[in-house]
Image (tube, rainbow, N blue to C red):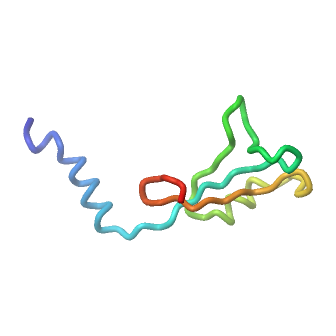
Amino acid sequence: MSMLNHLSALADRAIRATTPFSPRYSVALIDRRTGRPHTISGIPLVVMTAEPVTASHELMRNRDPGVWDIFIERMDRNGAIQ
């Protein structure tokens, strides 16, 4: 293979290396009655975002705070939860 086959991957790595990393967060909606995450078709509702406060306000919109809670976790550069 020639170098042209990998040009887009090299460009992507170069851009990631030169741009500063903004922290990412995992924001989950938790049912206070069960202590478990809210699920849709068996899949937990989790939002990945750089703005956890905004995401938590959106998730809690039109929901009873006595029933629902928000759980926020910081993620590392690779997307793993810290």
Counting every numbered tag in the picture gives 0
Residue 74 x %, y %: 57, 62
16 and 37: which one is in front?
37
44 relative to 64 in the view: left or right: left
24 vs 42: above or below? below
Query: Which residue appears at 10% of the width and 44% of the height?
Result: 3
Q: Quadrant of residue 66?
A: bottom right
Query: Which residue appears at 29% of the width and 64% of the height?
Result: 17
7 and 27: which one is in front?
27
30 and 6: which one is in front?
30
Determine the residue located farthest toward the bottom in the rendered image.
20
Query: Which residue appears at 72% of the width and 34% of the height?
Result: 40
23 vs 68: above or below? below
Q: Quadrant of the N terminus?
A: top left
Residue 14 x %, y %: 24, 60
Q: Quadrant of residue 36?
A: top right
44 relative to 77 in the view: left or right: right
Query: Which residue appears at 47% of the width and 60% of the height?
Result: 76
Determine the residue located farthest toward the top in the rendered image.
41
Residue 71 x %, y %: 71, 57
